[in-house]
Image: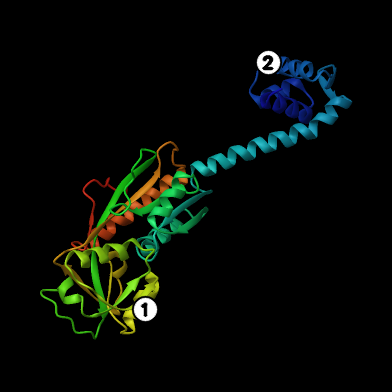
């Protein structure tokens, strides 16, 4: 028994005539007759009373008709849903990103994606790169934005797509007077100034600590263990300065941004997904949206943020 046979049976039951049913189904009448005969043989029951070209349903045919109708409707619904997925009208994308990117790049990405594909459900996991890579490997996420300069992909189970390289910058309130040279501030000049330090769960915290240690410096930390969004608020309230990624500092009119010098600090951002699993149409569209917005961000913030040299060209 197959769907073609059930569709032929349901059409024949509706019109009550082999010739008319064959015309609706675009079949030759002998082909329709063979389908019905095969269906009756498979089910072990006569489905039709045949008399002078007209047909009526037997008791078995009457019992089969509502079942066949429901099965055909279910098949049609499956086809529609698959078409909707292919056309990006429905679907789900589960992805992750570090907190700093949730506050910057992803803000525009999500707005852009939702406008283009309002029927796609998005599931966001906010965590550090190490955790996101573990969840990618476990199959929990479709993809993740990661800080690949701190957590490179060691094995071959994941694909790493380079996106952006960004500077780490110093942020202060607008009224703060800083000893800068051509818009740059060295770690030695920054060290004695009051600073707000991120939680140790951030890769950025260990990166800045290592940079200070390399120069034999100890920063003057007035508050530590803070999450990224709180850092911005505390800096605005004049509690201290902070080192943050350039993506976080842009479009913050209440903050002043200075570039670091001696040494300049950068980080690389990548998009990762499993190598052995093809991205769904919805996930592939999300990847394209991320690359497109990364390109725009790099173009609008030349110098502080740039495309990684290995980054693929974003689709239009």
Q: Quadrant of residue 56?
A: top right
184 or 48, nearer to the observer? 184
Q: Is residue 155 left or right of residue 52?
A: left
Q: Is residue 89 left or right of residue 292?
A: right
Q: Is residue 141 left or right of residue 70?
A: left
Q: Is residue 25 left or right of residue 204?
A: right
Q: Quadrant of residue 83?
A: top right
Q: Is residue 115 visible?
A: yes
According to the picture, the residue beneath numbered tag 1 turns out to be 233
Alpha-carbon neighbours of circle 2 within 10 Å: few (<14), some, or many (≥20)?
few
For the point 19% across and 71% down, which residue is it? 217
Alpha-carbon neighbours of circle 1 within 10 Å: few (<14), some, or many (≥20)?
some
Q: Position of residue 96 (x, y in %)?
A: 43, 55
Residue that lies at the very extreme toward the right in this rendered image? 59
Q: Nearer the viewer, mark 2 or mark 1?
A: 1
Q: Position of residue 192 (x, y in %)?
A: 20, 79
According to the picture, the residue beneath numbered tag 2 turns out to be 31
Q: How many marks?
A: 2
Measured along the vertical axis of the image, is residue 59 above or below residue 292? above
What whole-number distance in Å separates the C-alpha atoms at marks 2 and 1? 75 Å
For the point 40% across and 45% down, which residue is it? 273
Q: Which comes before the other along the chain, label 2 or label 1?
A: 2
Element on which disc 1 rests: helix
Q: Is residue 186 visible?
A: no
Element on which disc 2 rests: helix
């Amino acid at each position: 028994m197959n769907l073609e046979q059930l569709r032929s049976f349901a059409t024949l039951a509706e019109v009550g005539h082999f010739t008319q049913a064959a015309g609706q189904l675009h079949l030759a009448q002998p082909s329709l007759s063979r389908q019905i005969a095969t269906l009756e043989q498979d089910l072990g029951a006569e489905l039709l009373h045949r008399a002078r070209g007209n047909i009526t349903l037997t008791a078995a045919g009457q019992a089969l008709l509502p079942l066949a109708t429901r099965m055909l409707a279910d098949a049609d619904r499956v086809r529609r849903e698959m078409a909707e997925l292919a056309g990006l009208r429905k679907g789900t994308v589960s992805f992750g990103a570090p907190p700093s990117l949730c506050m910057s790049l992803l803000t525009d990405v999500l707005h852009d994606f939702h406008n283009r594909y309002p029927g796609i459900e998005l599931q966001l996991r906010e965590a550090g790169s190490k955790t996101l890579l573990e969840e990618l490997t476990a199959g929990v996420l479709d993809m993740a934005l990661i800080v690949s300069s701190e957590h490179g992909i060691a094995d071959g189970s994941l694909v790493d797509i380079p996106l952006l390289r960004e500077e780490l910058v110093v942020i202060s309130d607008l009224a703060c007077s800083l000893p800068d040279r051509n818009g740059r501030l060295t770690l030695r000049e920054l060290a004695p100034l009051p600073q707000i330090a991120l939680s140790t769960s951030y890769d950025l915290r260990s990166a800045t600590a290592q940079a200070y240690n390399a120069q034999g410096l100890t920063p003057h930390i007035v508050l530590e263990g803070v999450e990224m969004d709180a850092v911005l608020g505390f800096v605005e309230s004049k509690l201290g300065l902070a080192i943050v990624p350039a993506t976080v500092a842009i479009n913050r009119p209440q903050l002043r941004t200075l570039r670091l010098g001696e040494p300049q600090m950068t980080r690389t951002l990548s998009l990762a997904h499993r190598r052995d699993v093809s991205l769904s149409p919805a996930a592939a569209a999300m990847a394209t949206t991320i690359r497109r917005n990364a390109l725009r961000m790099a173009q609008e913030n030349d110098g502080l943020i740039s495309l990684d040299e290995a980054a693929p060209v974003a689709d239009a």
